[in-house]
Image (spheres, rainbow, N blue to C red):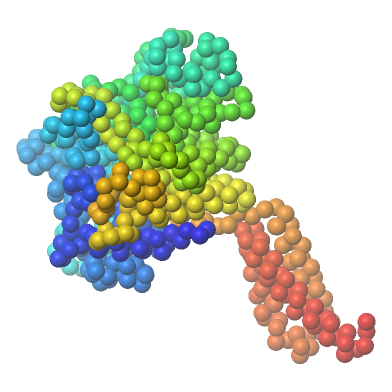
Amino acid sequence: MRMQPRQEILDIWRALVRWSWQKDQWVWGGRFDSNSIGDAEQLLCLLLPASKVHVFGLDDPDRTGIDSLDALEEFGGTMEIPRRIIAVLQDYYVRYTDESTAGEETAATPIFAGGSYFNEAMDGSEPTEEQRQLDIVDSYAMAITLSLAVVGFARVFRSKTRRQAIRDQIDDVERRASARLTAAMVGLLRSFSVNVFDADSEYGRNLVRTVNQEGLPSREVVDGLRIELRQTMASFREVLIGSGQVTDLDSQNQLFECGWSWGIVEDAPNIEVAPTEAIGVQRKGIAEQAPYLYFTVIALDAIEDLFSERTRVLGLLNEEQQRLSRALQLRSDLTRSYWATVATYGEGTRWPLEDIPWRTTDGLDSDYFTLQVTSLAVKGLVQDRSSNDELVRIGNVLSELANRARMTRRPNRNDPALTLHHPGVQLSLVGSERAGDSEITWIVNEFAPLLLQRTANIAGLLSDAADRGALLETADRVWEHLLQRRLQRGPGRNLWDDPSGAFTELEGRVPPQNAPSWLISERVVAALVATATVLDRRPLTSPALGEHADALLSEAEQLFDRELMRGTGKSLESDIKSIRANLRRAREIISDRPGTAAHLALSVLGLLNDLSAGRQKSTGVN
């Protein structure tokens, strides 16, 4: 790849520290005022690579890389960096804990408010203060990812320091992170939604129209969907805690969709947790009982972190958190299965997913929704052990989306596709009017970094080297687009986002940007981490290359044995150890790296050929 994730992450770390660490203090906020989500994204720009890519680890001072120390030199030295990270984390958890709820029977309550990320209503009215304090799924998801990174960081760093004061600080951070993790898991359980509707309703007609790629009668499509989703419908009976219980899917005229709403759904029951889990007050829900693609995807990404290898190996979840994670996993499995079925429904030559743009059940359509559905479809297909060809089809959709979003094609004058990048897609948060005068909105404009991340993820799942290479080429082109959108001036330079840097058509429409958007910057970091993970895997091989390498190695081994039978002589004696080592190494790696094995075999064959030619010359044999 032309993109170099390691160097790019180091450059982002330099920019992050330049903006955030001023006069020996951590500065919160960027383009938006400080809030629970943006501040978590700011921290994840540092901790996401440190927790998910081994070479960027910061929790063990003895193993911190020289390049990482150089990038973070303004933040301190080998021992200062982890200490200061702990202090900043402690400040974050204190800032987003409501101590007023603490009493004899209740604990302090973690704060998951959207704050300055909430956008004005469709009528132009600003959110009320009560609306800005509403919990939102985005904050729950970020809390899970951040807290898992923090708990793991704290446990490793604790074993590397002997100072009791620092150990006490680490213990406090881990306790607060664990409490916030539990509260976030409870919040996600109470935000899960199943929207059941009649096939003849507007929702039903929109769903049937989206999946019906063969022009079949509507009744046939409804019956077919219910057959394909029968296991999913049956599994809803296992949803016992939180929201999402369904009892009215028995009618043959009922369809549904499932996922996560924007916040705690209306009438969501409280969840009983162990007395040891200090999560404070469970707030009343007001969000509509309907899933949103954006919040569903971000919730599923966070739930995957609960079951990652790192979480399992380090034992980051306590017993109660493991119970809650199993309940979340059930909802995750149901959601992935549902969306994979809907996105790939039918026996025709075109999937509903390939009919761009995706139309939601409430009648909205956007390329952004297609991008979100690709993510959901991949999660479901991987769960069902999909074929390489199915993943290639989704990769082709991503390449088409890159074209349609004008990241790999030149835009037209006043091109409507540019609204994906600025101002973005505006989502109405139905139910938020109960806390104010009007229904407020949520802006999503991370199309480009999200496309890069999804492209890298799918490339890592492909089993064919040529297919993977083609998709990584798309990723390179999207990255070149993102490079043009980095901030160019001020302490926030080399962070994101200035879309006018890539689209001159937006000049004058986008205000001059000097402060970073932590939302976009964190998504770019997540995409780079995903790409680094793909590049760190063992290379793909083809059967033909393996057979070729095996044939070369067999010939080299046979010729070497024959030379030994004839007597080594002084000409071969000095090379015997080297040849044996090369042949042994080639045989060890031939299944994983047949190209390298072939190279080693060819080097041995070349040496043996020189020896044979020299013998023939000395004996006069032609």
Question: Nearest the camera: 132 or 237?
Answer: 132
Residue 240, above or below 323: above
Left or right: where 342 falls relative to 387: left
| Quarter of the view holding residue 122 | top left
Residue 379, image x and y in percent? Answer: 47, 37
Residue 253, above or below 10: above
Question: Nearest the camera: 184 or 32?
Answer: 32
Residue 256 in sight from this viewpoint: yes
Residue 255, image x and y in percent? Answer: 43, 16
Question: Nearest the camera: 214 or 326?
Answer: 214
Residue 56, above or below 306: below
Residue 238 in sight from this viewpoint: no
Q: How many marks?
A: 0
Residue 351, image x and y in percent? Answer: 56, 28
Residue 505, above or below 370: below
Left or right: where 73 falls relative to 6: left
Question: Nearest the camera: 389 or 244?
Answer: 389
Q: Please give the name of the residue rendered at 52% of the width and 58% of the height, measured from the top-left corner.
A: 1
Q: Please give the name of the residue rendered at 93% of the width and 82% of the height, measured from the top-left corner.
A: 622
| Quarter of the view holding residue 594 | bottom right
Residue 525, image x and y in percent? Answer: 37, 53
Q: Please give the name of the residue rendered at 23% of the width and 40% of the height, measured from the top-left corner.
A: 117
| Quarter of the view holding residue 213 | top right
